[in-house]
Amino acid sequence: MSGKPNDASEVVVATSSINSYGSNRSLTHRGSVNSPSSSDLPDDIAEDAQSQNENSQTASFPGTRLHFASLLIFALLFYTGVIAIALATSQYIYARYAAEVGIEDAGRNTDSSQCKGVSNATQDLRRRAAIAQERSAKLSLYTSLAQGIPSLFSVFLLSAFSDRWGRKTSMFVPWCTTFVSFVIHVLVVLLDLPLEWLILSSLVSGLGGSFASMLASVFAMVADMTAPSSRALYIGIAEAVFTVCISVSELTVGVWIRTRGFREPVIAFAVVMTLSIVPFLCFVPETSPGSLRRRQLGIVSAEPLTWRRFTDLLSGTMRLFNSNWRRAKILISLIVAFFFLSLSFLAFGVNTLYLLGLPFCWNAEKLGYFIAASSVADQIVFVLVLGLLRSRVTDTFLASIGLASSAVQNAVFGVAFLFPPPFDDITLYLSRVAGLLSKLPSTMLRAMLSKSVTATEQGAAFGAVAFIQVFASLFAGTVTNAVYAGTVASFQGFVFFVLALWIVLSAVCVGCYSHFKRRYGRQAVVIEIDGKDNDGYEGLV
């Protein structure tokens, strides 16, 4: 990253910034080749052909440290608010349903001895606790569907458009819908409105792409600002910010709920999310190569959104998979791996229900300390491993050991309820020790994907990942809540073995990626334009 800002006239779009399977090298030109006329190509490809920068070490937007720091501050405020509200909502739903069946609110319970251990719990108490958890799981399922279904469409559109219209536009839309969603959340908690209003809140959030659309744009901005050689590091830094958000949210929400109830933390974190608009509007730059190119050409007005332009914009995402079948196999392997990984990581609502209910009966404060400490430990190990091994081993190896760590963690977590106190809690802690490398896979998969596409395809690539994340969250929320509701009375840890199986399938996909990479090598690096190979350039695209 540059130490000082460049003038707009000096910004050169690095559409040919290509990294071949993790090795950083410049594009090379093979002989004299007559490139197709720009008038014969789709708009995006014609503009790509006019790119002048052939240095793979160059970022498409030479951002400064201030730009990157501003983006991180925005992400910190936004995701702290979003994650905190999500965690508080999960506990709030359980507290409301628990009160309906006559169980003391586990979130504010400071003495959980009334249900600590199966031997100390009456049959009636176990039955009522199971009813509360089953109702909570079903409502979580409905909110997941309400948010996930519209997000499938909006995240795809916003991410595809960001390469042309700009990253900030695709970020502002989900910010607005999240703000409206938070207003509904606050009203539900303040006025004790029916819990079904949370379904409406989730629907509004989903119309803007929810967290996945914002996540895609943030990572696309990071890719715009960084060279391929350092991209994994900066993506790791961005993910570290999300870890901080989780830690702060979990720790603060847990203590706050136990001491003051739900109203104050929900309002406070809604305000935190709202404040994120300040660094976003004032300091976060536009980094999209397409938007910068239009600005350089003096095009300041928006193009009318005709059907032809609409389909042209969407075709940018489709070209990731139909421009070169060899590259398509590599990208599909990565995206499917990310799908199965996301399934396991997006089921955190089940974790909360698991720990709040029998036999653990954790209160909100203990739950907050547990997840916050886990997140901090994960991040420390992540930074150490990435710093020590990044230049010594492949991205594939780091992703693989992280997946193995995650699978073991879920398996141990799922059998913790079988042990009597205090060994049940000890088993939970041991599961987190086993999962200390679980932060590696998502970072490495994003870095591997970003290095496999050009600078003008970053938005489309991360948009494809965001689409998969939304679909995964929809699928995960539906399946895990249904599985948990159906097995909580018989073997309540069964759902975590399902999560472990999904991680194993993700590892299989990473193995397929490694196989295709070795098999095709440089055969997968030929750019195809309108179905024809353009042999004038080499490099993984």
Image: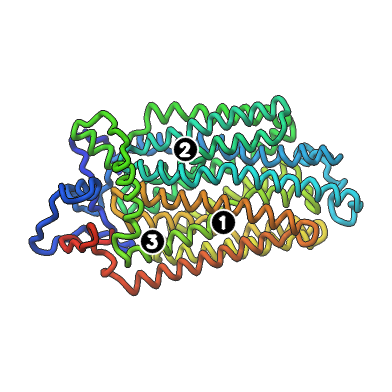
- Left or right of 497, for residue 471: left
Q: Is 266 on the left-hand or right-hand side of 445? A: right
User: Can the viewer see residue 225 in this picture?
Assistant: no
**Is disc 3 placed on a helix, strand or loop?**
helix
Where does residue 229 sit, x and y in percent of width and height?
32, 55
Residue positioned most to the bottom: 519
**Which residue occupies 79% across, 45% down?**
132
Asked if the residue under mark 2 is in contact with the one under mark 1, i.e. CB atoms within 8 Å, the reply is no
Q: Residue at x 56, y 27 (%)?
A: 271
Closer to the camera in the image, 167 or 438:
167
In the picture, the disc for residue 75 is 2
Disc nearer the start of the sequence (3/2) = 2
Image height check: is 172 above or below 391? above
Residue placed farthest to the front in the image? 307
Horizontal and vertical percent position of residue 265: 65, 30
For the question of whether residue 205 can be seen, the reply is: yes
Which residue is found at the position 40% from the left and 51% from the top?
Answer: 233
Mark 2: give few (<14), some (14-19) or many (20+) Cα within 10 Å.
many
**In this figure, which residue is indicated by the disc labeled 1?**
343
Amino acid, disc 3: Leu
Residue with the mark numbered 3: 331
User: 62 or 273: which is nearer to us?
Assistant: 273
Left or right of residue 247: residue 48: left
Q: CA distance from mark 3 to mark 2?
A: 27 Å
Can you give x and y, in whole percent of width and height, for residue 19 in the image? Answer: 29, 58
Mark 1 or mark 2: name the one nearer the start of the chain: 2
Q: Amino acid under label 2?
A: Ala
Render colour scheme: rainbow
